[in-house]
Amino acid sequence: MNHWLVKSEPFKYSWDKFNEDGRTFWDGVRNYQARNNLKAMKEGDLVLFYHSNEGKHVVGVAKVVKEFYQDPTTPDPNWVVVDLVPVETLKNPVTLEQIKAEESLKDISLVRQGRLSVMPLKATEFDKILEMGS
């Protein structure tokens, strides 16, 4: 199993809305590195859901339930989506400041490549953020 982090601006698509919907396809990715990360996602992979811009914190865990396919919001075949379902809300959101202050997380893409919207995490990094949010 692989681990990931996806970012969404809460005013565009929030964790609460995701939970209300129960399932979504992760669209709007228009960066090749992020797109390649979507293509690497496998059914059953776990995903941290991060609110960007407003809040700047990890708020929950999702799971990949359908691997990549053509993004239905564009006719351009370069762009893909995956389907995600919410799994669990973190008891305590984990802020970007907390992540930056944690030595074991200093090399994650969230810190090094702030604009990347879909990024891989090592299992240890994923577990550390979950621990921080419990």
Image (cartoon, rainbow, N blue to C red):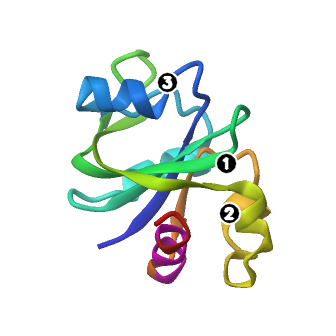
Query: How far from the left and from the top, in percent, is residue 130?
Result: 47, 68
Report the label total. Answer: 3
User: In what element is the residue under mark 2?
Assistant: helix
Which comes before the other along the chain, label 1 or label 3?
3
Which residue appears at 44% of the width and 79% of the height?
A: 123
Q: Contact, CB < 8 Å: mark 1 with mark 3?
A: no
Mark 1: give few (<14), some (14-19) or many (20+) Cα within 10 Å.
Answer: some
Identify which amino acid the numbered label 2 is placed on: Ser
Is disc 2 surrounded by few (<14), some (14 to 19) or many (20+) residues within 10 Å? some
User: Which residue is depicted at the point 44% across and 34% down?
Assistant: 15
Residue nearest the viewer, comparing 75 with 109: 109
Q: Residue at x 33, y 19 (%)?
A: 72
Q: What separation in Å lies between label 1 and label 2 (alpha carbons)?
A: 7 Å
Does 126 appear in magenta? yes
Queried whether the magenta region covers residue 27, the answer comes back as: no
Q: Position of residue 106 (x, y in %)?
A: 75, 76
Residue highlighted by disc 2: 109
Looking at the rendering, the stretch of residues picked out in magenta corresponds to: 124-130
Figure quadrant of the N terminus: bottom left
Q: Give the residue drawn at x 41%, y 67%.
A: 3
- Asked if marks 1 and 2 touch (Cβ < 8 Å), the reply is yes
* Closest to the observer, 111 or 93: 93
**Residues at marks 1 and 3, CA–CA distance in whole angstroms:** 17 Å
Real-space Cα distance between discs 3 and 2? 21 Å
Q: Amino acid at mark 3?
A: Tyr
* Label placed on residue 13: 3
Which residue has dot 1 on it?
116
Instruction: Please tell me how crowded label 3 is: few (under 14), some (14-19), or many (20+) other residues with Cα within 10 Å.
Output: few
Left-right relation of 107 to 72? right
**Residue 89 got which mark?**
none
Kindly report which numbered mark, 3 or 2, lies closer to the viewer in this rendering.
Answer: 3
